[in-house]
Image: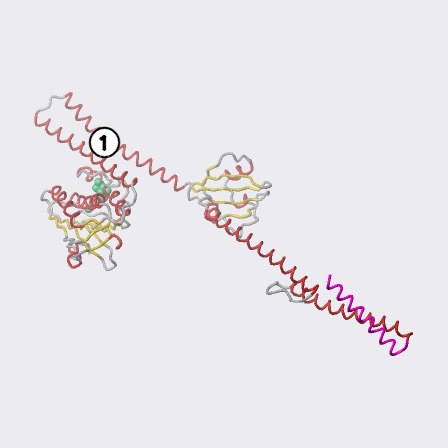
Amino acid sequence: MSWLLSRFVAGLLAVVAGGLAGLVIGGERSAFVGALLGGLFGFSALLIHDFLRGLRLMRWLRGSHEGMAPRDTGFWGEMAYRVERSLRGLERAAEVERMRLAQFVSAMEASPNGVLLLDASDQIEWCNARAADHFGLDPQRDRRQRVTNLIRSPAFVDYLQEGNFDEPITFSEPRGRGSLQVLIRRYGTDSKLVLSQDLTERERSEAMRRDFVANVSHEIRTPLTVLSGFLETMRNLPLTEVEQRRVITLMTQQAERMANLVSDLLTLAQLEGSPRPTADKWVRVASLFAQVETEARALSAGRHTIAFADAGEAQIAGTETELQSAIANLVNNAVRYTPDGGYVDVGWRIADNGSGEIAVADTGRGIAREHLSRLTERFYRVDTSRSRESGGTGLGLAIVKHVIQRHGGELDIESEVGKGSVFRLVFPAARVRCLNVSVAVTASESAELSLR
Ligand code: ADP
């Protein structure tokens, strides 16, 4: 209240000063008029002064409120201080709300599902990028549009109009790329939350699983049929000793085929079910080569010229059994798919960027370009009868790809019909080391065989 008192005192002083001035100039009679004029003048001056101070504050309030409010004393000073404080408080609260909203929106954006918000009249309020992709919407342009004008799929329109949202519905994606599952939930005052999920990937993996089971069943049934046929023959027909021996050899082959298949299936299951190999167990490339070489020479039985590069003291970080299985699969394939008299060459090199490469090259029949991208699919074979004849399961390259991916590397395939193939396992530099550089950098002889 001190500001009121000071104005009162100032007014009083103006009245007294006016009265005194009147008294001096015109005697007693003019004192009253002088006091009146003095008071009028004093109060007008105070009013103008206050008006100017208020105007300064008003100007700041009308602006963007940036910077501090005009500093003043007394009534206007307190007024400016309090207005500024509550404004800053409101701004802070709005900022907190803005951040919360931004966080909420980014959480919605991160959702693996499409999220679409509709108001009570089914107009689009907001949608995340995934929903925009699922329904072919533009999040900015399509706001406030009626959703049924944009998503015209009859199944969706009926679902929305019927209003029974207990179960989700499934229908083809508007762009015809696959299937969408949509679930609607009500919230607030008849607003709707539309959740969408792309089922294409799930349907594809379900189809892959079905194909896999069908393939495994087929692969197992074929040798079983052959075996039971032979057993039937042996039981019903009197066979000579030579015929019996031939039948038993064929039965043994079929049994081996089944055993190979089961073993490859188990390897795949193990690869899928175990954690990625750590990068702290080092395996010598030379010892991997030595184990594989014995097997390859036995398989070839002298029909091919087989050469393994000297890998010196090079090492790869990973799981020995997996690495051996991958290299063995590649080398055995090279032997199996290369006609007698051909060459199989296994090379090792460390590239300039430090990555390590095992290259298995052969001078075999080669593979046509159109098959290359599918070779690592389970049970994919270029020549089914040739694969089966030579004891193949159709799972070898799937195992190789799995192993190399688990070791952070890549399988690279180069092939030309009639010339041969090169299968390369490329390991990242982090998983390759060489304790004796001069020996380990020895170039693979595969250079001679590489396709040009
Ligand atoms: P399989 O047990 O049938 O050999 P893989 O998965 O090991 O199965 O190989 C898939 C297919 O790739 C084989 O059936 C064969 O047609 C082809 N293939 C693999 N390696 C070679 C190679 N070195 N030369 C020619 N064709 C090959």
Q: Say which quadrant the C terminus sits in.
A: bottom left
Residue 22 in magenta stretch: yes
Residue 347 in magenta stretch: no
Outermost residue, right side:
29
**Relative to 232, is 261 above or below?**
below
Q: What residue is drawn where x is 36% and y is 39%?
A: 205
Q: Main secondary structure of the magenta part?
A: helix
Image coordinates for residue 442, horizontal then vertical, percent: 16, 57
Amino acid found under the numbered disc labelled 1: Thr
Outermost residue, bottom side:
25
How many marks overall? Answer: 1
Q: Determine whether, in the image, residue 195 is placed left or right of residue 435.
A: right
Q: Nearer the viewer, residue 275 or 290?
A: 275
Crowding near the residue tagged with mark 1, few <14, some 14–19, many ≥20 C-alpha atoms within 10 Å: few
Image coordinates for residue 13, horizontal then vertical, percent: 80, 71
Q: Nearer the viewer, residue 410 or 97?
A: 97
User: Dividing the image into four equal quarters, which quarter contains ligand 1?
Assistant: top left
Q: Which residues are magenta?
A: 1-27
- Specify whether residue 224 is in view: yes
Q: Nearer the viewer, residue 389 or 429?
A: 429
Question: Label 1: which residue?
Answer: 222
Image coordinates for residue 6, horizontal then vertical, percent: 75, 66
Q: Is mark 1 within 8 Å of ligand 1?
A: no
The part of the image, by quadrant, that contains residue 220 is top left
Q: Say which quadrant the N terminus sits in.
A: bottom right
Image coordinates for residue 309, horizontal then vertical, percent: 14, 52
Q: Determine whether, in the image, residue 366 is placed left or right of residue 81.
A: left
Q: Nearer the viewer, residue 374 or 90?
A: 90
